[in-house]
Amino acid sequence: MIIPECRKCGYDLTGMPTSGKCPECGQDYDVKYRTGVRLPESPVEKSQRIYARARTIILAAIGVILLGVGCYAQFILDFEMAIYTVGFLGLMLLLGAGISYISESDD
Ligand SMILES: [Zn+2]
């Protein structure tokens, strides 16, 4: 059961028409088109949000590790090209994490 609330003031719109004005603050709302209302997160939306956040964190973590390994191998162990291979891969993953982070709030 969905309990819509006014997005502006949080007024409980249960039992109100599916669209109209909030009786408390006058905010226009439409439950069907989800404008002006704050609907509780469904379990699917919640799991999608958690998945998106986990994806960002994992990409960033692996990116940092690979970048660290690349730098370490290049400058400490003196492996040639390590920074351009492993380090570059790490950088790409960090970039992916950035894109993942930006897209978290989408859809
Ligand atoms: Zn309101």
Image (cartoon, rainbow, N blue to C red):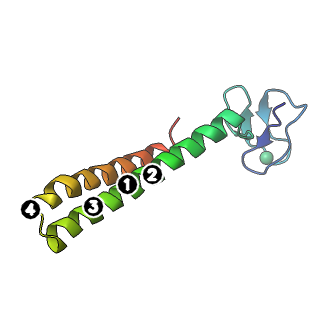
Q: Which residue is mark 4?
A: 80
Q: Quadrant of residue 46?
A: top right
* Label 4 vs 1, first from the N-terminus: 1
- Disc 3 and disc 1: Cα gap in Å? 8 Å
For residue 17, the mark is none
Look at label 2 and name its amino acid: Ile
Task: Indicate which disc, 2 or 4, sits on the residue closer to the N terminus.
Answer: 2
Please provide percent x and percent y for residue 68: 29, 65
> In this image, 35 relative to 74: left or right?
right
Q: Crowdedness of circle 1 by 10 Å Cα count: few (<14), some, many (20+)?
A: some
Task: Please give the name of the residue rendered at 83% of the width and 36% of the height, measured from the top-left corner.
Answer: 3
Residue matched to label 2:
58
Q: Earlier in the sequence, mark 3 or mark 2?
A: 2
Asked if disc 1 and disc 2 are in contact, CB closer than 8 Å, the reply is yes
Decide if ligand 1 comes within 8 Å of the CB at mark 3: no
Query: Where does the image place residue 34, in percent across and percent down from the top left?
Result: 68, 32
Residue bearing the label numbered 1: 62
Left or right placement of residue 30 versus residue 15 in this view: left
